[in-house]
Image (cartoon, helix red, strand yellow):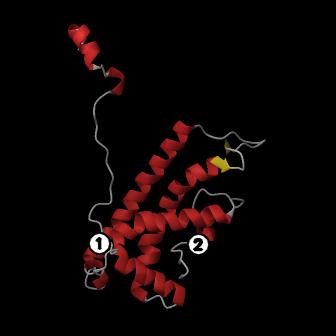
C-alpha cells in the first residue's frame, strides 16, 4: 500500500491556524488526511489528486503543482482541517466511554458552539476552495488531468460547485402537526 502524502503538514497547521502547539500530531494527521480526501479531492479530481500524491511521495513536485499546492490547496486545507478537528479535540474516546475533555484552566465549548465553529470554518474553507476551482478552470491547459482525470470506476471528476447550501424550510418553532392545524385552523 502506498504512503498517503499529506498536502499540508501538522507543523503548518500549528503555525498558520488557531491550533495550539501542544495538540497531538496524531489528531492533526487524521484531520489533514480526511480534509484533503473529503474536500480537496472532489474539487481537483482524482487525476490531479493522484498526481500530487505521487509527486510528493517521490519528491518531484513540478513548478505548476507547487503553485497549485502552496497558493491554493494549502490555504483551503487549513480551514477544512480546522473544521475536521472541532469534534476530535472536544471529545476523547476512552475504553469505557466517549468523554468531553476538560481542563483545570479552561471549559470546553458546548455542542451548539462546536456546530457554529465548524460552520464558520466551513464557510471560510468553501471560499478558499472556490479559488482552487477557478484557478484550475483558468489554467486548464496547464492541468490536463483536470478535464481528463481518467476512466476507472474509482475516478473522481472535478466538482463544479464548492459551496454547500441547505434548504430553508421555514421556522421550525412555528411548525404545527396536521392534527394541530385541524383542531385549531384559525391559528395557522
- Where is residue 97? Give x, y as percent: 68, 44
Residue at 41 percent of width and 52 percent of height? 123
Q: How many marks?
A: 2
Q: Nearer the viewer, residue 84 or 121?
A: 84
Q: Residue at x 63, y 61 (%)?
A: 27
**Viewed as shown, does residue 151 lie left or right of 100?**
left
Give the structural element (helix, strand or loop) at label 1. Answer: loop
Q: Is residue 120 visible?
A: yes
Residue 132 visible at all: no
74 or 186: nearer the viewer:
186
Query: Could you tell me which secondary element the residue under label 2 belongs to?
Result: loop
Eye-nearest disc, 1 or 2: 1
Residue 9 is marked as 2
State the image coordinates of residue 164 (x, y, percent, origin top left).
33, 52
Camera-nearest residue between 137 and 71: 137
Residue closer to the observer: 107 or 155: 155
**Which residue is at a point 54% across and 74% down the rendered structure image?**
6
Which residue in the protein does label 1 denote? Answer: 157
* In this view, 150 is above or below 44: below
Pointer 1 or 2: first along the chain: 2
Asked if 83 appears above or below 41 in the picture, the reply is: above
Disc 1 versus disc 2: distance between alpha carbons? Answer: 26 Å
Residue 61 is situated, as x and y percent measured from the top left of the image, at: 47, 88
Amino acid at each position: 500500500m502506498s504512503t498517503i502524502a499529506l498536502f499540508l503538514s501538522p507543523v503548518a497547521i500549528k503555525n498558520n491556524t488557531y491550533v495550539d502547539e501542544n495538540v497531538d500530531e496524531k489528531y492533526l494527521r487524521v484531520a489533514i488526511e480526511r480534509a484533503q480526501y473529503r474536500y480537496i479531492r472532489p474539487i481537483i479530481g482524482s487525476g490531479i489528486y493522484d498526481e500530487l500524491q505521487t509527486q510528493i511521495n517521490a519528491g518531484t513536485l513540478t513548478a505548476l503543482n507547487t503553485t497549485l499546492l502552496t497558493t491554493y490547496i494549502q490555504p483551503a486545507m487549513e480551514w477544512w482541517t480546522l473544521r475536521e478537528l472541532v469534534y476530535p479535540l472536544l471529545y476523547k474516546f476512552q475504553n469505557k466511554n466517549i468523554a468531553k475533555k476538560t481542563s483545570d484552566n479552561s471549559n470546553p465549548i458546548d455542542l451548539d458552539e462546536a456546530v457554529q465553529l465548524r460552520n464558520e470554518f466551513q464557510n471560510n474553507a468553501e471560499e478558499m476552495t472556490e479559488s482552487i476551482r477557478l484557478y484550475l478552470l483558468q489554467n486548464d491547459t496547464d492541468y490536463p488531468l483536470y478535464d481528463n482525470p481518467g476512466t476507472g470506476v474509482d475516478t473522481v471528476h472535478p466538482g463544479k460547485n464548492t459551496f454547500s447550501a441547505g434548504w430553508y424550510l421555514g421556522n421550525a418553532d412555528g411548525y404545527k402537526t396536521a392534527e394541530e392545524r385541524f383542531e385549531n385552523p384559525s391559528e395557522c
